[in-house]
Image (tube, rainbow, N blue to C red):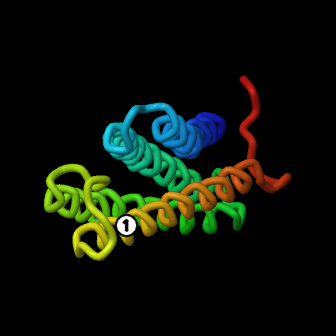
Amino acid sequence: MLTVLRILRTYALAAWVGGLAFFIVVAAIAFSTLPTPFLAGQIVRGSLIAIHRIGLGAGLIYLLATLVMLATRRDGHPTRVAEVVLAAVMLTLTMYSQMSIIPRMDTDRNALGGDVTKSSPGVPAYDDFQKLHVRSTRVEGAVLILGLIVLALGPIHGRNEYIPPIL
């Protein structure tokens, strides 16, 4: 059972962190190859929402598997507590982005007629959109960095842990 829980944790976290890393590539390619920033923004927005859904599901799986390991005392290494805290922060940041930043950016985009690139600095909705874009980038970067830290902590476990005999 311990092995299954560790595998679930690894798969969930790898999907989340890998998705965030891939999102960076998608965003860069979208803005460098699509004919307009508007189209690139549409692709990036949709991709980010999908990554958030993956992250929320994977984060819950990760937390549940880790909490089961702690509750059953199958893996009580102190790093598990740090992992739970970091994963909870990752989930909180992802929910903040999904439920607060993105809807406010959408409101600003709609106030600008659907295309932010047709506006300019000094227009309140444009300025707010740009501020939220910077915040979104920082939040996603923080989630990625925290995810890499949690990924590094995952393999750490004590040598004296109970490992059931193979039947």
Can residue 12 be seen in this snapshot? no
Please name whichever residue, 139 or 88, is drawn nearer the observer in this view of the structure: 139
User: In the rendered view, would you say 46 is above or below 95?
Assistant: above
User: In the rendered view, would you say 46 is above or below 88?
Assistant: above
User: In the rendered view, would you say 44 is above or below 121?
Assistant: above
Q: Position of residue 89 (x, y in %)?
A: 49, 67
Please name whichever residue, 59 or 49, is drawn nearer the observer in this view of the structure: 49
Q: Position of residue 117 (x, y in %)?
A: 31, 53
Residue ID for mark 1: 130
Name the residue located 75 percent from the left edge and 27 percent from the top edge.
166
The quarter of the image holding the C terminus is: top right
Q: Position of residue 73 (x, y in %)?
A: 62, 56
Name the residue located 70 percent from the left edge and 64 percent from the top edge.
79
Q: Position of residue 12 (x, y in %)?
A: 53, 40
Give left or right: position of 50 versus 4.
left
- Res 36 quadrant in image: top left
- Res 109 quadrant in image: bottom left
Name the residue located 72 percent from the left edge and 38 percent from the top edge.
164
Q: Residue furthest top?
A: 167
Give left or right: position of 114 versus 164.
left
Can residue 17 be seen in this snapshot? yes
The quarter of the image holding the N terminus is: top right
Name the residue located 30 percent from the left edge and 72 percent from the top edge.
128
Q: Residue furthest right?
A: 159
SS for dot 1:
helix
- What amino acid does circle 1 point to? Gln
Residue density around tag 1, few if under 14, some if 14–19, many if 20 or more, within 10 Å: some
* Tally of numbered tags: 1
